[in-house]
Image: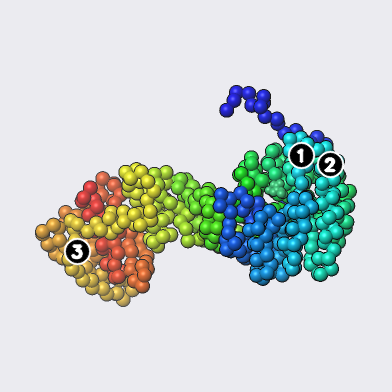
């Protein structure tokens, strides 16, 4: 990089606007969506899509609900022409979908394009020429009138060539793009677009789409919105036009440009899935649509199975959707950080307890289930994760609802392991640590055999007697005791033994289903004479036995320590 970029780069000069209305507007309805995946997206690929891939992509766009699809540039190559014909002749285009074909404002290409669309039901013929100051200077060496003449001559030819098609019943509409609009003097952009509207005989009944591209994104989205508001206010035949935007993403602001442009009056957006397209791509249709969705506006596009769409996209384009891509990236619904995990956990609990219909979970702007991502782990564990994260995984992946008091201890066990290995721990490894540390803590004290006797007296009080054989390494010994329940009886039975240095603090038990097998799991909280907490976990098909195993698990863990 150079020290004085001002010596090299020409900054964008914003319009002088005294008043602007767009900042006070809201997006309350979706735009008319047009996909340019099969044209702008395709022409930016290292290996452009073949016929099969384009067809599969086309059908996916139809399934998503896109009603206007730019299928290519049929005059550009034989392949493009063939694809257009196959779509039409092969009956791939539903009656409510309009195909759009792109052509430069050049007579022989326009003629070839008319050949390519024969027999289609609904067509948008999209023609363009470049209008910016820079392109006029370095590419076309032409003044404004010369550039306007290219556009209006093309409009005249298109209008004439359309007549037989319209007579045959084709629903043929027109779209004009002043390519590099963002670098065009706004008054000139208005002038050329107004001329095109007139040459195409646009009326409020037969509107022409004026597609205003940021061919190369060159300014902040607010400046662009000013331009759109200005452009619309100056266009004499505003009611004869549909204002469309075609944002690229060179500054990484394509989505904001589209959103602010809509506030400024744009009614239609040309976009691609996941923002594929030239250089940094076109604006991402998924992000734009889902941004509306989470503001409570139905985008009228269906991304309920984003993973399937992503898989198709990656296979057909051979491009990758990044892990952080909004709504679709592999990691966008995942929290590694402890404080985020804790807040998500609390949000999940709040939603369960409040039975609220509203989505109110911190750090998750959208319910992953709405885009078909409910089966992926939200909380993943590495060295950045907190104490509650491991408990969340135990609960949501394996159904073990650890008592709150136990979270720090188990979280610590997991953290020691993440620090040791230095990588993420998969849920299976977390479960292994849980098993090794708690359920498998069956030595040195083992319960060899036991029996319970229970009776209830006239006042309804329960009396339980426990008798059992315990083993400590090679020594077995008998114990017996009574109490008001199995845990009390067992504690009284081990009274006087070496293991008798704990007080019982708390206990929690629930059923757990693993496959077709249902078991009880008991979490036991003991405290030793030094006030140190010890947790144990027992599992059994017998709900009386699970807590006893849990007590021995806690005692064994203390003995090992
Ligand atoms: O980016 C662009 O300007 C285009 C036009 C052809 C609309 O793709
Ligand atoms: Zn483009």
Q: Nearer the viewer, residue 87 or 488?
A: 87
Q: Nearer the viewer, residue 532 or 26?
A: 26
Secondary structure of the residue carrying tag 1 is helix
- Identify the residue at horizontal 83%, vertical 60% (top origin): 161
- Identify the residue at horizontal 54%, vertical 51% (top origin): 319
Query: CB atoms at circles 3 and 1 under 8 Å apart?
Result: no
Q: Nearer the viewer, residue 391 or 332?
A: 332
Circle 2 residues within 10 Å: few <14, some 14–19, many ≥20: few
Return the x and y of residue 74 as percentages of the image width and height. 69, 57
Q: Which residue, as the protein is rendered here, is positioned at the far bottom?
A: 458
Circle 1 residues within 10 Å: few <14, some 14–19, many ≥20: few
Is 56 on the left-hand or right-hand side of 433? right
Labels 3, 1: front one: 1
Query: CB atoms at circles 1 and 2 under 8 Å apart?
Result: yes
On screen, residue 450 above or below 46: below
**Residue 447: mark in rendering:** 3
Q: Earlier in the sequence, mark 3 or mark 2?
A: 2
User: Separation of disc 1 and disc 2 at Cα?
Assistant: 9 Å
**Residue 146: mark in rendering:** 2
Is 429 on the left-hand or right-hand side of 98? left
Q: Which residue, as the protein is rendered here, is positioned at the far left?
A: 474
User: Which residue, given by chain and number where applicable, does mark 1 sit on?
Assistant: 140
- Identify the residue at horizontal 50%, vertical 57% (top origin): 348
Q: Quadrant of residue 29?
A: bottom right
Q: Is residue 34 visible?
A: no
Return the x and y of residue 453 as percentages of the image width and height. 23, 73
Does mark 1 have its CB less than 8 Å from ligand 1? no
Is 104 on the left-hand or right-hand side of 481? right
């Amino acid at each position: 990089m150079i020290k004085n970029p001002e010596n090299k780069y020409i900054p964008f000069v914003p319009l002088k606007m005294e008043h602007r209305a767009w900042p006070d507007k809201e997006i309350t309805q979706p735009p008319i969506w047009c996909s340019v995946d099969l044209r702008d997206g395709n022409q930016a690929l290292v290996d452009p899509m073949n016929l099969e891939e384009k067809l599969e992509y086309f059908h996916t766009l139809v399934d998503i609900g896109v009603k206007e699809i730019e299928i290519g540039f049929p005059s550009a190559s034989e392949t493009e022409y063939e694809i257009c014909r196959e779509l039409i002749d092969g009956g791939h285009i539903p009656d409510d979908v309009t195909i759009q074909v792109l052509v430069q404002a050049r007579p022989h290409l326009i003629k070839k394009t008319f050949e390519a669309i024969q027999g289609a039901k609904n067509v948008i013929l999209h023609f363009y020429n470049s209008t910016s100051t820079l392109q006029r200077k370095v590419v076309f060496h032409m003044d404004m009138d010369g550039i306007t003449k290219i556009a209006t001559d093309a409009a005249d030819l298109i209008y004439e060539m359309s007549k037989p098609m319209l007579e045959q019943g084709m629903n043929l509409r027109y779209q004009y793009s002043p390519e590099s609009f963002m670098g065009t003097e706004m008054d000139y952009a208005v002038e050329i677009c107004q001329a095109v509207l007139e040459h195409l005989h646009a009326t409020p009944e037969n509107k022409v789409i004026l597609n205003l591209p940021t061919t190369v994104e060159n300014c902040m989205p607010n400046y662009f919105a000013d331009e759109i508001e200005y452009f619309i206010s100056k266009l004499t035949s505003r009611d004869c036009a549909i204002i469309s935007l075609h944002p690229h993403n060179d500054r990484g602001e394509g989505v904001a440009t589209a959103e602010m442009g809509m506030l400024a009056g744009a009614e239609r957006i040309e976009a691609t899935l996941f923002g594929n397209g030239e250089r940094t791509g076109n604006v991402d249709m998924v992000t734009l649509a889902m941004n509306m969705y989470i503001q409570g506006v139905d985008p009228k596009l269906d991304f309920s199975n984003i993973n399937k769409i992503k898989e198709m996209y990656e296979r057909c384009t051979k491009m990758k959707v990044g892990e952080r891509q909004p709504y679709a990236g592999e990691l966008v619904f995942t929290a590694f950080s402890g404080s985020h995990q804790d807040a998500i956990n609390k949000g999940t609990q709040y939603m369960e307890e409040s039975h609220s219909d509203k989505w109110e979970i911190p750090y998750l702007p959208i319910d992953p289930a709405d885009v078909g991502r409910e089966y992926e782990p939200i909380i993943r564990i590495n060295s950045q994760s907190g104490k509650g994260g491991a408990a969340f995984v135990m609960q949501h992946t394996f159904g073990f609802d650890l008592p709150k008091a136990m979270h720090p201890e188990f979280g610590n066990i997991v953290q020691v392991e993440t620090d040791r290995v230095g990588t993420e721990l998969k849920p299976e490894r977390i479960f292994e640590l849980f098993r090794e540390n708690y359920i498998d803590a069956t030595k040195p004290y083992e319960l060899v055999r036991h029996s319970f006797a229970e009776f209830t007296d006239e006042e309804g009080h329960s009396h339980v007697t426990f008798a059992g054989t315990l083993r400590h390494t090679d020594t077995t010994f008998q114990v017996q005791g009574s109490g008001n329940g199995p845990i009390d009886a067992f504690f009284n039975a081990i009274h006087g033994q070496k293991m008798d240095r704990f007080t019982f603090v708390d206990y929690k038990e629930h059923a757990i289903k693993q496959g077709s097998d249902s078991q009880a799991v008991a979490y036991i909280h003991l405290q030793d004479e030094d006030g140190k907490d010890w947790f144990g976990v027992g599992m059994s098909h017998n709900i009386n036995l699970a807590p006893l195993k849990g007590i021995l698990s806690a005692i064994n863990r203390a003995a090992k320590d």
